[in-house]
């Protein structure tokens, strides 16, 4: 039995399932604003450090947290260099978030810088990608050392596996540590798990194939990091050549049919291992990748520069 999932189908399945419930443990909702969570007294003044907080994904995370839990203290962690004016971007983000926020300069490759940033922080959200070609899990290691709860939005298979190797150390430090907790992978895995569970219940059989199909128009509104991620994935050495195995998939009204191509995303490994699906594939469509395919170096610094330029280009802007 083959099992196919697009984000549109999976989201519908999640919304229509009576077995899926949204709840916040020990929290009460403010009746005047259903989107605001009143935290328990013991965690009401908790501090959250968002690394990459001046970027598109990190900034959106900080904004969402601030709106959901106004009592939280949000610390925006960002770089500051000749190429990136982190302080200016950080000041703008703090101005947007309001009184319960501040900016701190952080170098995630420097142990001392990370240690200082994590001091008196209850949770660190690592959104400072791209995660491809990262040699170490420096933020996770620092979080374990300082006994700080950890969550990242990693979208790289090698990094995710390396992060999971710290399981015993995180348990010994008595901290929660979650990797690949973004949209894809992350929400995509939850969607897949729900669909696989539904398929088993309805057919009383075990799915043999699971396919993830993604459509990203340019940067998808997520900034240059997602472009850098995609370019770096093209350089990974795996059994099947990246951006091969083209399939024509119908994404529904507003998008229509698009050709999608294989990429090595963490869902492939995790869905196979955890859900027990023999064959798992991830395919993605992105016009920017198709335009640049064959013309991009797979060196991380080069890719970052190219992606910054592409994010500002008329071609990418016209499809976001």
Image (cartoon, helix red, strand yellow):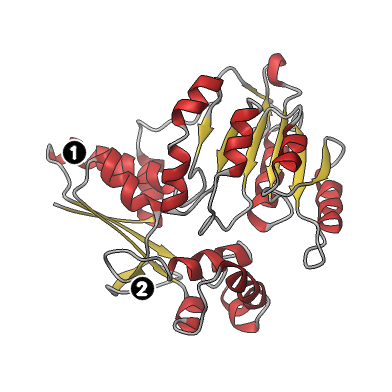
Q: What residue does disc 2 label?
A: 243
Query: Few, some or many C-alpha atoms within 10 Å of disc 2 (few <14, some 14-19, many ≥20)?
Result: some
Task: Answer with the quarter of the image where residue 262 lies.
Answer: bottom left
Q: Is residue 141 left or right of residue 52?
A: left
Q: Residue at x 45, y 30 (%)?
A: 167
Disc marking residue 200: 1
Q: Residue at x 72, y 15 (%)?
A: 41
Asked whether residue 216 appears in the rendered view, the answer is no
SS of the residue at dot 2?
Answer: loop
First-in-chain label (2 vs 1): 1
The label nearer to you, 2 versus 1, is 2
Q: Is residue 211 left or right of residue 41?
A: left
Farthest top residue in view: 42
Q: Is residue 25 left or right of residue 79?
A: left
Asked whether residue 245 appears in the rendered view, the answer is yes
**Relative image position of residue 186 (x, y in whole percent):** 45, 45
**Relative image position of residue 82 (x, y in whole percent):** 82, 66
Q: Quadrant of the C terminus?
A: bottom right
Disc marking residue 298: none
Q: Residue at x 86, y 51 (%)?
A: 91
Q: Is residue 147 above or below residue 249?
A: above
SS of the residue at dot 1?
Answer: helix
**Relative image position of residue 3 (x, y in whole percent):** 22, 53
**Relative image position of residue 15 (x, y in whole percent):** 41, 42
Task: Answer with the quarter of the image where residue 243 lies.
Answer: bottom left
Q: Residue at x 53, y 52 (%)?
A: 135
Q: Is residue 239 above or below residue 200?
A: below
* Count of all numbered marks drawn on residues in the image: 2
Work out how far the residue at label 2 is from the one at label 1, CA to CA, in angstroms. 31 Å
């Amino acid at each position: 039995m083959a099992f196919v999932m697009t984000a549109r189908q999976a989201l519908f399945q999640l919304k229509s399932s009576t077995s899926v419930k949204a709840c916040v443990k020990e929290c009460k909702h403010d009746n005047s604003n259903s989107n605001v969570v009143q935290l328990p007294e013991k965690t009401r003044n908790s501090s959250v450090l968002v690394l990459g907080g001046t970027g598109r994904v990190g900034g959106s995370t900080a904004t969402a947290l601030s709106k959901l839990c106004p009592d939280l203290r949000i610390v925006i962690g960002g770089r500051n260099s000749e190429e990136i004016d982190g302080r200016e971007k950080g000041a703008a983000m703090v101005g947007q978030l309001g009184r319960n926020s501040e900016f701190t300069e952080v170098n995630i490759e420097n142990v001392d810088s990370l240690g200082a940033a994590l001091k008196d922080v209850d949770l660190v959200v690592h959104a400072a990608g791209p995660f491809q070609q990262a040699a170490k899990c420096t933020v996770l290691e620092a979080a374990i050392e300082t006994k700080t709860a950890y969550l990242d939005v990693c979208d790289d298979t090698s990094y995710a596996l390396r992060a999971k190797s710290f399981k015993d150390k995180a348990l010994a430090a008595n901290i929660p540590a979650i990797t690949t907790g973004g949209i894809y992978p992350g929400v995509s895995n939850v969607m897949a798990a729900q669909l696989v569970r539904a398929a088993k219940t309805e057919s009383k059989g075990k799915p043999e194939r699971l396919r993830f199909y993604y459509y990203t128009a340019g940067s998808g509104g997520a900034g240059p990091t997602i472009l850098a991620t995609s370019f770096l994935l093209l350089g990974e050495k795996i059994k099947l050549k990246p951006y091969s195995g083209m399939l024509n998939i119908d994404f529904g009204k507003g998008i229509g049919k698009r050709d999608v191509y294989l990429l090595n995303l963490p869902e492939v490994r995790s869905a196979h291992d955890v859900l027990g699906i023999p064959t798992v594939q991830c395919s993605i469509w992105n016009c920017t990748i198709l335009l640049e395919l064959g013309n991009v170096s797979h060196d991380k610094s080069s890719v970052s520069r190219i992606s910054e330029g592409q994010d500002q280009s008329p071609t990418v802007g016209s499809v976001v």
